Every structure is written in C-alpha cells, then in structure tokens.
Amino acid sequence: NLIKGAAFTDPGATALDDRDGNITSSIVVTGTVDTNTVGTYTLKYNVSDAAGNAALEVTRTVNVSLGPDTTKPVITLVGDSTI
C-alpha cells in the first residue's frame, strides 16, 4: 500500500529460462500507477523465450490510499455556549 503522493518505484521481476538463461531484460510490463489518485492499480508482467514460449503472466497489485486519518474533528456550537 502506498500513501497518495508517495513515490513508487516498481521492484520489478526476474525471468529465467532453461535454455536461454536469464531473460529478465525481455520482460514487458503493462499498466501504470498514479500515486496522485487513490485507487487500485495492476501491473502485468509478460515474457517469452527465444523459441516463442510465453511464461504465465504474473501481476502486481498496488493500492494507493489516503493513509491513516490523524486529523481530529472540530465541533462548533451554534449559538451561545451558556444558555
């Protein structure tokens, strides 16, 4: 979970193939995260090896929220405080 306005850096993912080895640099990420807008965002990670075999897509969910409410409410009397 991220607080609205916080910076977001995608921690990324890794991909290994039994023949091609490390194919992390070929991962394609789709989706965006707008940390200025409260909501739930999904990033999708896809990769294929040299033979065209596609990995099972994986997803990351990023929740952007207002954070904890720490502001006290204010009471304002209507009329005099002593009647």
Image: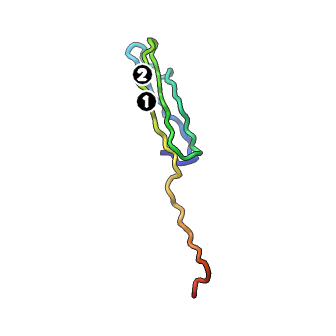
Q: Amino acid at mark 1?
A: Val
Q: Which mark is residue 58?
A: 1
Rendered view: 47 above or below 6: above
Quadrant in the rendering for residue 52: top left
Q: How many marks?
A: 2
Rendered view: 73 above or below 37: below
Measuring from the top left, give residue 25's x and y in whole percent: 50, 22
Rendered view: 52 above or below 68: above
Residue beneath the point at 40% across and 18% down: 17
28 or 83, nearer to the observer: 83
Task: Residue lying at the far top in this picture: please name it.
Answer: 51
Crowding at label 1, few (<14), some or many (≥20) Cα neighbours within 10 Å? few
Would you name the residue on which mark 2 appears?
55
Q: In the figure, is residue 19 to the left or right of 73?
A: left
Q: Secondary structure at mark 1?
A: strand
Q: CA distance from mark 2 to mark 1?
A: 9 Å
Residue beneath the point at 47% across and 21% down: 47
Measuring from the top left, give residue 40's x and y in whole percent: 50, 42
Measuring from the top left, give residue 4's x and y in whole percent: 56, 48
Q: Amino acid at mark 2?
A: Ala
Q: Which mark is residue 33?
A: none
Residue beneath the point at 48% across and 34% down: 11
Contact? badges 2 and 1 (CB < 8 Å)? yes
Q: The C terminus is located in which quarter?
A: bottom right
Q: In the figure, is residue 62 to the left or right of 35?
A: left
Q: Secondary structure at mark 2?
A: loop
Measuring from the top left, give residue 69's x and y in whole percent: 51, 58
Q: How is the image coloured?
A: rainbow
